[in-house]
Structures are given as C-alpha cells and as structure tokens.
Image: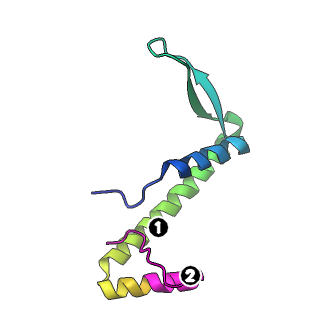
Amino acid sequence: MQPIFKLSHPVLCKAVNLLLKEGVIEQYKERNKRRGRPRKMLRVNESQRKRAENLAFKWNAYLFSLTAAVKALRAQPEDARQKAIAAYYENVGLKNQSLNFGIK
C-alpha cells in the first residue's frame, strides 16, 4: 500500500529552514572517519524540546485527520466523491480545479 501523502524535497527543505530560523532545531557538522567531508546534521534544540514535541503532536493530529478524510472519500461512490471535492474547492474559493488530492 502506498502512502496517502508524499512530502517533496522542496517542501521538506522549507520546513527544515523554518525550524532552523525559529531555533527549534540546530545544525552541526559531524565527520565520519570512513567518509570524506563532514556531513550536516540536525538536532532538536534542548531549550525548544517542549515546543518541538508540541509541533510534532499537532502535525501528527493533522495527518491523522486528513488521512481519515481521504479514506472516507475513497469509500464513497465516484459521483459523491467528485461532489465532495467540488464542494471543498468552492469553500476555499477555487473553481474548476482538476486536482483531486490523488484520491482514486
């Protein structure tokens, strides 16, 4: 079974850069004796650990609810699914979108 959501490299980089800027995570270099140049590593800033845990909890709750919504849409007949997607686009102010959230 394939994952419902995929995170692209540019989106991941933006998220990491935001967390670095906010001070939630910090970057350091670590050298492995068997490899060439030092590698950039990330770790949670200890002074921001509670905040990082709170952000992770909120992200997991968001993904869980979104996954449940996608599974519910997949269980509906095709015409009901398309109506639900059209209603979503209308609610967010978009018209005639061809995207369907990858719901098949």
Q: Amino acid at mark 2?
A: Leu
Q: How is the image coloured?
A: rainbow
Q: Quadrant of residue 50?
A: top right
**Which image quarter holds the C terminus?**
bottom left
Where does label 2 land, which residue?
94
Q: Main secondary structure of the magenta part?
A: loop
Q: Position of residue 83 (x, y in %)?
A: 41, 88
Q: Nearer the viewer, residue 96 or 93?
A: 96
> Tag 1: residue type?
Leu
Q: Residue at point 32% right, 82% down?
A: 76
> Reading the chain from its start, which is encountered first: label 2 or label 1?
1
In this view, the residue farthest toward the top is 33
Instruction: For residue 16, say whether it is visible.
Output: yes
Helix, strand or loop for disc 1: helix
Q: Residue at x 44, y 74 (%)?
A: 99
**Alpha carbon separation for disc pair 2 and 1:** 19 Å
Q: Please provide the residue range marked out in magenta.
A: 85-104
In the picture of the structure, the residue carrying the numbered disc 1 is 66
Please give the name of the residue rendered at 52% of the width and 62% of the height, measured from the top-left corner.
Answer: 62
